[in-house]
């Protein structure tokens, strides 16, 4: 998504729209509150019928997805849902310009505004991968793709954050995601990542 594309314009306008003081949809709110915020957000621009999931595509090679979910981060816990949004995820896919952690962080700033971005920036790293153990497990299990994923989990004062990119062998990553979730769900995600 280059600067000249519509998706880049979407990302740039997120900052302006949220700095104007709009309400924010954050984990911990009800699905109705999150849906109302998504509907009112001029940057996400949901289509008719899009409630908690917004999908945009400039081309098949460039896509953006935002989703608010009442489930814990990571693998779905059976029978676990709820009356509040626990996890919000943005996914970028760009085979033309690539996806970097910086682009994901700028998207976070744009979508959630300066308060949440500052919480993310000051958050402490609780898990970073790949590491020696991750690479070894991937090779031993015959799943080297997991060893190629690059990511980190952070714990802020307000929320926890998970950022992940999937680079090719040449280092170019065309997909990535950044997830904002409730801090109380952090042990579940850490356990899943350690056992990946």
Image (cartoon, rainbow, N blue to C red):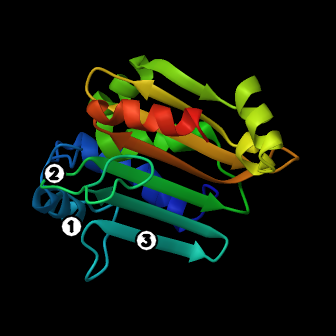
Query: How far is the residue under mark 3 from the one under mark 2?
Result: 22 Å
Query: How far is the residue under mark 2 from the one under mark 1?
Result: 17 Å
State the residue position of label 1: 39
Q: Nearer the viewer, mark 2 or mark 1?
A: 2
Pick whichever, 77 or 177, lies toward us.
77
User: For the C terminus, which image quadrant?
Assistant: top right
Instruction: Describe residue 69's horizontal placement relative to residue 83 as left or right.
Output: right
The reply to whether residue 20 is visible in this rendering is yes
Q: Quadrant of residue 114?
A: top left
The reply to whether residue 131 is visible in this rendering is no
Residue visible at 29% across and 53% down in the picture: 71
Q: Is residue 106 above or below residue 117?
A: below
State the residue position of label 3: 55
Few, some or many residues within 10 Å of mark 1 (<14, 14–19, 20+): many
Few, some or many residues within 10 Å of mark 3 (<14, 14–19, 20+): some
Cβ atoms under marks 2 and 1 closer than 8 Å: no
Q: Residue 84 shows which numbered tag?
A: 2
Q: Residue 87 shows which numbered tag?
A: none
Residue visible at 35% across and 47% down in the picture: 111
Few, some or many residues within 10 Å of mark 2 (<14, 14–19, 20+): some
Cβ atoms under marks 3 and 2 closer than 8 Å: no
Residue 33 horizontal/vertical position (percent): 11, 56
Q: Nearer the viewer, mark 3 or mark 2?
A: 2
- For marks 2 and 1 on the same chain, the one whose residue lies earlier in the sequence: 1
- For marks 3 and 2 on the same chain, the one whose residue lies earlier in the sequence: 3
Q: Residue furthest right?
A: 170
Residue 119 horizontal/vertical position (percent): 34, 24
Residue visible at 44% across and 53% down in the picture: 90
Instruction: Describe residue 170's horizontal placement relative to residue 138 as left or right.
Output: right
Q: Secondary structure at mark 1?
A: helix
């Amino acid at each position: 998504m280059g600067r000249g594309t519509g998706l880049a314009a979407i990302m740039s306008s997120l900052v302006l729209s949220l700095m104007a003081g709009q309400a924010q949809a954050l984990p911990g709110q009800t699905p109705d509150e999150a849906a109302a915020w998504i509907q009112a957000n001029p940057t996400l621009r949901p289509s008719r019928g899009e409630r908690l999931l917004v999908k945009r595509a400039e081309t098949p090679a460039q896509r953006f997805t935002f989703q608010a979910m009442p489930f814990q981060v990571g693998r779905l816990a059976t029978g676990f849902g709820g009356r509040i949004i626990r996890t919000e995820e943005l996914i970028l896919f760009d085979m033309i310009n690539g996806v970097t952690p910086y682009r994901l962080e700028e998207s976070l700033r744009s979508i959630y505004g300066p308060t949440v971005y500052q919480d993310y920036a000051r958050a402490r790293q609780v898990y970073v991968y790949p590491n020696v153990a991750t690479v070894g497990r991937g090779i031993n299990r015959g799943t080297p793709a997991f060893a190629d994923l690059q990511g980190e989990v952070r714990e802020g004062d307000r929320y926890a954050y998970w950022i992940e990119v999937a680079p090719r062998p040449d280092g170019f990553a065309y997909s990535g995601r950044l997830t904002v979730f409730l801090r109380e769900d952090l042990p579940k995600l850490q356990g899943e990542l350690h056992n990946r």
